[in-house]
């Protein structure tokens, strides 16, 4: 079975541009979460979606948005990119998003903002 | 509120030596605790999780961790390090928000031959 897949793997943008990152969860998983991992730090929670509804949001500005589609795949959108948005963006899926569930992570999208 | 502190951003051990990676947590509710491993250019992979069933949790690749409520700790150990254990390790806690895992800043483990 395929794991969590993310696209693209690498992306280079310039300040002020917009970016869309994509994630396909493991088959059967209904919950998708997004994390930002800046070099040298642990992942920071951005969003969680379950059954197409936002279940949780981290401390990120409104430039960050996401959505989940009927097939449970998800997109993360970032507007008006800043240099500080350069990071590894990780998508994780789980069956129901319950508190005791482990997360299955994709390999991430490395975003560089110049 | 929940938080995680990983003591020591870098740990170096010799092959065959004991591995001890430290994690202390803070949570306003009984926590669920996790250890993940990240190899270069890869996502995170679960090593083990604590969900209140047993305080000593065994994971993959010979790792285990003990939940100590009195010390608010969940340290990760392995009796004998292998070269393949070299990676970055993250401790994470889940509490009130089911969807949110709070991660520590990670510990990079180096294994010397």
Image (cartoon, helix red, strand yellow):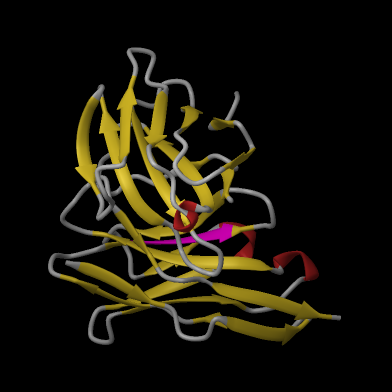
Q: Main secondary structure of the magenta part?
A: strand
In this rendering, position of residue B41 left or right of residue A108 = right
Q: Position of residue A66 (x, y in %)?
A: 32, 32
The residue that appears at 56% across and 64% down in the rendered structure is A39
**Residue B17 seen in render:** no
Q: Report the side of B100 relative to B18 (left or right).
A: left
Instruction: Pick the residue in front: A63 or B77.
Output: A63
B30 lies above or below A91: below
In the visual, does A101 lie left or right of A90?
Answer: left
The x, y position of residue B17, in whole percent, is 71, 85
Is residue B31 among the parts visible in the rendering? yes
Quarter containing the N terminus of chain A: top right
Q: In terms of image quadrants, where is residue A94? A: top left
Foreground residue, B7 or B22? B7
Q: Which residues are magenta?
A: B33-37
Left or right of residue B18: residue B92: left
Q: Quadrant of residue B57 in the image?
A: bottom left
Q: Is residue A61 above or below residue B84?
A: above
User: Residue A95, position in %: x, y?
Assistant: 35, 31
Q: Name the residue furthest right.
A: B113
**Relative depth, front residue between B84 and A44:** A44
Q: Is residue B58 above or below residue B12?
A: above
Q: How many marks?
A: 0
Q: Residue at x 21, y 33 (%)?
A: A54
Is residue B41 highlighted in magenta?
no
Residue at the image position 60 percent from the left and 67 percent from the top: B88
Decide: is A6 above or below A102: above
Percent x, y of residue B112: 81, 82
In the figure, residue A70 lies in which quadrant?
top left
Residue at 58%, 57% (x, y): give it: B60
């Amino acid at each position: 079975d395929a794991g969590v897949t993310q696209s693209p793997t690498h992306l280079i943008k310039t300040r002020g541009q917009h970016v869309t990152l994509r994630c396909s969860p493991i088959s059967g998983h209904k919950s998708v979460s997004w994390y930002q991992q800046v070099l040298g730090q642990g992942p920071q929670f951005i969003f969680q979606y379950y059954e197409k509804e936002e279940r949780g949001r981290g401390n990120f500005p409104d430039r960050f948005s996401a959505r989940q589609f009927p097939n449970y795949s998800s997109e993360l959108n970032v507007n008006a990119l800043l240099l500080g948005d350069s990071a590894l963006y990780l998508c994780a899926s789980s069956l129901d998003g319950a508190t005791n569930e482990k997360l299955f992570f994709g390999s991430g999208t490395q975003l560089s903002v110049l | 509120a929940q938080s995680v502190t990983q003591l020591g951003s870098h740990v170096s051990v010799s092959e065959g030596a004991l591995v001890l990676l430290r994690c202390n947590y803070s949570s306003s509710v009984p926590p669920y605790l996790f250890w993940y491993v990240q190899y270069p250019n890869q996502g995170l992979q679960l090593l083990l999780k604590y969900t209140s069933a047993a305080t000593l949790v065994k994971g993959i690749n010979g790792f285990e961790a003990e939940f100590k409520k009195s010390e608010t700790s969940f340290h990760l150990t392995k009796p004998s390090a292998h070269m393949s254990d070299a990676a970055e390790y993250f401790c994470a806690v889940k509490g009130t928000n089911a969807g949110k895992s709070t991660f520590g800043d990670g510990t990079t483990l180096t294994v010397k031959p």
